[in-house]
Amino acid sequence: MRKDMMSIALGLVAVALSFTPLIPLQLAGVVLGALGICASRRARREDYRRDLTCSIGLVVSIAGVLLCALTPIVYLVGNVLLA
């Protein structure tokens, strides 16, 4: 599988995991998103002609990391405020 397509797939899985109610799965989503970012950067260095798919993979992976990282933080802050 090409690295640019792999980064898109990893980013999409990370975004999907951000909607699960289990915090360990969301932390796994952060790891998958980070792997997607690395794969996107490597694919861009290997072949500059794949710039569009690398950019899509980078954006989706960053969105997945942010969503997966923010959800547990918001959950914990909400529980502290309710207590």
Image: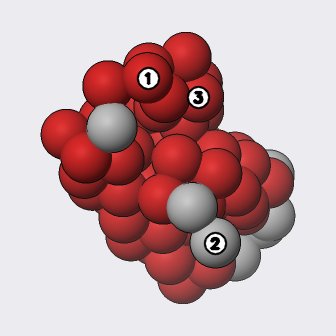
CA gap between label 3 and label 2 equals 13 Å
**Please, what is the three-letter code of the amino acid marked with disc 2?**
Met
**Dot label at residue 53:** 3
Residue 38 relative to residue 74: left or right: left
Q: Residues within 10 Å of mark 2 (few under 14, many from 20)?
A: few
SS type, badge 2? loop
What is the distance, in whole Å, between disc 1 and disc 3 at their CAs? 9 Å
24 or 47: which is nearer to us?
A: 47
Which dot marks residue 49? 1
Residue 60, image x, y percentages? 59, 32
Q: Amino acid at mark 3?
A: Thr
Residue 64 occupies which quadrant of the picture?
Answer: top right
The relative height of residue 78 versus residue 31 in the rendered view (above or below) is above
| Residue 83 place in picture, x, y as percent | 51, 50
Find the distance from the CA under tag 1 to the CA under tag 2: 17 Å
- Mark 1 is surrounded, within 10 Å at the Cα level, by few (under 14), some (14 to 19) or many (20 or more) other residues, namely few
At label 3, counting other C-alpha atoms closer than 10 Å, the crowd grade (few under 14, some 14-19, many 20 or more) is: some
Circle nearer the viewer, 1 or 2: 1
Q: Earlier in the sequence, mark 1 or mark 2?
A: 2
Counting from the top left corner in percent of width and height, residue 7 is at 53, 52
Q: Which mark is residue 34?
A: none
Q: Nearer the viewer, mark 1 or mark 3?
A: 1
The residue depicted at 32 percent of the width and 25 percent of the height is 48
Residue matched to label 2: 1
Is residue 48 visible to the viewer in this orientation of the structure?
yes
User: Could you tell me which residue is drawn at 33 percent across and 37 percent down?
Assistant: 47
